[in-house]
Amino acid sequence: MRKNSHKNSRINSDVQRVLSHIIRNELKDPRIGAVTSVVSVIVAPDLKQCKAYISVLGDKEEAEKTLAGLNSANGYIRRCLASSLNLRNTPELHFILDQSIEYGVTMSKKIDDINREMNERSREEQAADDDE
């Protein structure tokens, strides 16, 4: 089976959907942040391994606590995954912290700050030109 086959893409999206549901609705661990998202999932073609990229809205400490909570609930999550999906093998889960959303929010804020600063400068220059 090729890595980017249609079947593998479907399995990735199914695992991502079910994993999101499990994290949002079934885990009661207080370490897991309220705003935790499954950004993407990559299941190996042999269905033995699964990399789940997790994004947590909050500071670095909250993200690390969420990752620790997910890793400690790994067996339970895998069992839920096995009962929800009809796969030949239930993949071993590896949670990886994905900070791309946080990075995007930070960059967006920086761009907004620069735009605001440029608008203020152009207004000041325009006011100075009007005074002359």
Image: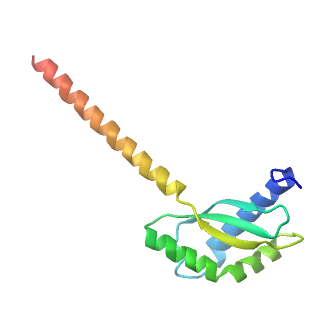
Image location of residue 23, percent across then percent down: 64, 72
The image quarter containing residue 13 is bottom right
> On the rendered structure, is 69 left or right of 129?
right
Q: Residue at coordinates 71% horizontally, 77% vertically from top-left?
A: 77
Q: How is the image coloured?
A: rainbow
Residue 58, placed above or below residue 113: below
Number of numbered labels in the structure image: 0
Image location of residue 107, percent across then percent down: 43, 47
Q: Residue at coordinates 59% horizontally, 82% vertically from top-left?
A: 28
The image quarter containing residue 52 is bottom right
Residue 132, placed above or below residue 5: above
Image location of residue 22, percent across then percent down: 68, 73
> On the rendered structure, is 109 left or right of 96?
left
> On the rendered structure, is 115 left or right of 57?
left
Quadrant in which the C terminus is drawn: top left
The image quarter containing residue 95 is bottom right
Q: Residue at coordinates 15% horizontally, 19% vertically from top-left?
A: 129
Image location of residue 96, percent across then percent down: 61, 67
* Camera-nearest residue between 57 and 47: 47
